[in-house]
Image (cartoon, rainbow, N blue to C red):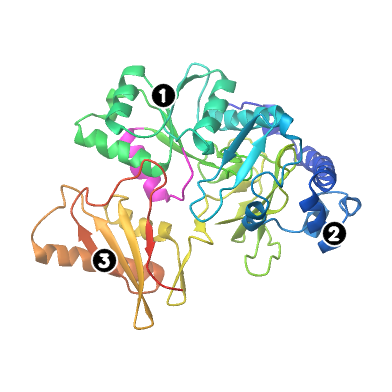
Amino acid sequence: MEKYYQPEIECASRKQIRAWQDERLVRQVRHAYDSVPYYRHLMEEQGVTPDDIQSANDLHKLPFTYKKDLRDTYPYGLFAVPMKDIVRLHASSGTTGKQIVVGYTLEDLDIWDTIVARQLVAAGATEEDKVHISYGYGLFTGGLGLHGGATKLGATVIPASSGNTARQITILKDFGSTILCCTPSYADYIGETLQEMGISPDELSLKAGIFGAEAWSEEMRRDIEKKLGIKAYNIYGLTEIMGPGVAYECSAQDGMHVNEDHFIVEIIDPETGEVLPDGQQGELVFSCITRQAFPLLRYRTRDIGAIHRGTCSCGRTFVKMSKPMGRTDDMLIIRGVNVFPSQIETVLLNHGYPANYQIIVDRVKSTDTLDVHVEMTPEMFTDNMGEIARRQKELVEGLRSLLGLAAQVTLVAPKSIVRSEGKAVRVIDKRKI
């Protein structure tokens, strides 16, 4: 029997959801225009005023917001309330320039806690559960985002944070953790470490995992579920929009329900900005329609996905977005072909290899090269060069079949690729473009 945190909202009629969106978007556009000079300037440049936005049908009239806008207004230029009303700050990692800084009012935090609680209940959590959080705490939204949702639900929070995997496993066993929250690559690493320690998943109390913050394939999902003996759920969010919980997976595990009472999602052509019909793949764009401190409108996420409407087997009526297959800024263009790390991961896992790999792209004599380093499992490891060559050739053919281009594959020893306790570093691009 499917359970809901807020059935009257999660299972509301499409007419009711649309009414909420129309009313809240109109109010939010006025709030942004009146309170954020930068937004007022963007709208004036586009020739739009709040009076032009009468419903969600008018959303396309608004200008897009880009990550560059958030950097150009660093740190507080897009805040729409006085600093005395900001009760918390979060920020992105800032690995490619200035950090993205976002603020929250008390009401914003309550909304965030609520939408994460919806995900926890969709994953089977109740107030009886022990939620083990191995996302990093601090300015990153992962740790505190899941923490707030679990607290709102009334579950027991275990704020383990990331790192020290052997200690994490001790806590998982001794504390009786039932829900694990972390990045999928770290969940996979925990599963791998369990095997090395000779600990069966049956010795843990885990029943479900909530994993996000990086793209992962269905093959990796099945691998994690097998290693940890759980059902693995995807959660989606960006620091800029709110943090984890913008969209969440239900028991159907075939897409994530967008919390449409707080966010409007669009799919656009990343080249032209044209809004695409449901089912077509493009760039995800989000508008925050209830957030007070940071009323982001038409934010281009760079994540590639699709949205689907229709009745879900779980009973929820929120639109579903696909698990992002990658990001436009993570997408590699190699000899004119678009390549996402998740595509390569699919081939490796289908051939029985672990999700420990590194993609190295270079340019030699004006031609792009694609080299994939893949770890062997201890069972596969051999010094038989003929056997290694055969396996490498098999993967080369698998990648050519899926990607339509030739790659070089190098099988490496177990544990030779550095593990990450946060987001995994999959791609090294050495090209000088």
Mark 1 vs mark 3, foreground winner is 3
What is the spatial separation of the Cα atoms under label 1 and label 2, in whole angstroms?
A: 51 Å
The residue carrying mark 3 is 409
Relative to residue 205, is residue 77 drawn left or right? right
Residue 305 vertical position relative to residue 361 in the rendered view, above or below:
above
Of residues 303 and 68, the one nearer the viewer is 68
Is residue 312 something one can see in this rendering?
no
The label number, if any, that marks residue 44 in the structure image:
2
Residue at x-position 16% and y-position 67%: 389
Image side of residue 340 versus residue 38, left or right: left
Q: Nearer the viewer, mark 3 or mark 2?
A: 2
**Within 10 angstroms of label 2, few (less than 14), some, or many (20 or more) residues?**
few
The stretch in magenta equals: 211-229
Front position in the image: 143 or 263: 143
Q: Secondary structure at mark 3?
A: strand
Q: Earlier in the sequence, mark 1 or mark 2?
A: 2
Which residue, given by chain and number where applicable, does mark 1 sit on?
A: 178
Q: Residue 405 falls in which quadrant of the image?
A: bottom left
